[in-house]
Amino acid sequence: MGVVRALPPSWIPMFFQRFDTPFALPCTLALGVLSCAVQPGGANEVADAVPDGHTHARTRGPIVFFAAHPDDETIGMAGAILQAVSEGRPVYIELMTHGDSSFVRSELVNGQTDAWHPGSHMYPLSVQSFGEARVREFMDAMQRLGVTGVNVSDFGSSSKLTSAQVTERVDYWLSRNERGLSLRGTAGAQDPAHATSPAPHPDHAAVWNALVASGYEDVLGYCIYEAVTGRCRYDEKVDVSEWCAGKRDALGAYETWDPSKGRYGIALHSTYGLLKNVGARCNEYVVRAIPDRPSTIDNTDPLPPQIEGDDLER
């Protein structure tokens, strides 16, 4: 079962605003992160929640964004997230893994330097500590995006994420019978992870396959790699200029280097070219759940000048 996570309310005031008291759920504090079990109904009833903290009727239901790794939600979906927040919808992020299998953990001890941050890589981290550092980046980004709440799962730490694991969380939301619920997530086979290969990231595909298999009507996927590959078979390119500044600000949470505070710019180390190219654009790329989608790549979206640095391992 996943857990809802929030930093202390003085750090991230928007989390749990739906409660009369900041943490009405049974919570434990460890390593500066509060973990609170999600249960349907009662004080935790999402249907009674809106981002401004007040309980009142609304015309649009909650929207839930599923991300395989910390940074997927901001790279591919931050514009959509910010738009939903602005519309007054309860916005929830489901994070499937801590992203602790990334190659960056070994880079942080290679003694080398990077032009974008001071000091050298001399920071040995355990798998657990590395995953917590990635979640720390994620929580910072969620604060900047102003979402209503998050659910942090720890699937896939020792192996690849599976659709069955994602389905656990999809079924949770469907079981609530929320009026106006929308489900969003990373695109799968339509979004190659590299310019030279048609293969998607397997964790992203696991998210998309679970969403499609749910049979739920209001499902959309978002391309993550289009800014560096130009190969996503998207159905719609969405201009998110109105939300571009906010998206860039959230990307900044993944670029912070401050080892004294457990911030290692992990996402930027992992996907430097992707983050920088996404920040240079104000578009997001939407995939619909269309059966028997053709395998040809038919978009002609030109790529911006590429900044090198990207890797499949996230």
Image (cartoon, grey):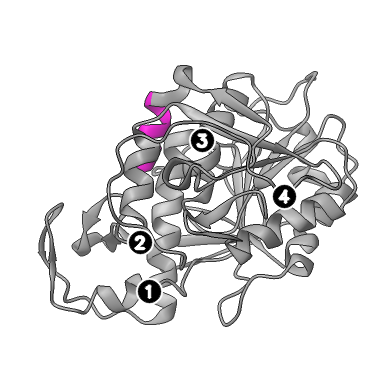
For the residues labelled 1 and 2, the Cα–Cα distance comes to 7 Å
User: Of tags 2 and 3, which is closer to the observer?
Assistant: 2
| Label 1 close to label 2 by CB (< 8 Å) | yes
* Magenta stretch: helix, strand or loop mostly: helix
Residue marked by disc 1: 103
Q: Position of residue 204 (x, y in %)?
A: 62, 58
Residue marked by disc 3: 78
| Label 3 close to label 4 by CB (< 8 Å) | no
Sequence-wise, the earlier of marks 1 and 2 is: 1
Sequence-wise, the earlier of marks 2 and 3 is: 3
Residue marked by disc 2: 270
Task: Report helix, strand or loop for mark 2.
Answer: helix
Task: Report helix, strand or loop for mark 3.
Answer: helix
Task: Report helix, strand or loop for mark 4.
Answer: loop
Residue marked by disc 4: 295
For the residues labelled 4 and 2, the Cα–Cα distance comes to 28 Å
Q: Is residue 52 visible?
A: no
Please tell me the numbered disc located at residue 164. none
* Label 3 neighbour load within 10 Å: few <14, some 14-19, many 20+: many
Q: Please, what is the three-letter code of the amino acid marked with disc 3?
A: Ala
User: Of tags 4 and 2, which is closer to the observer?
Assistant: 4
Q: Position of residue 27 (x, y in %)?
A: 60, 61
Q: Is residue 312 visible?
A: yes
Task: Report helix, strand or loop for mark 1.
Answer: loop
Q: Which residues are magenta?
A: 245-251
Nearest the eye: 236 or 85: 236
User: Of tags 3 and 4, which is closer to the observer?
Assistant: 4
For the residues labelled 1 and 4, the Cα–Cα distance comes to 30 Å
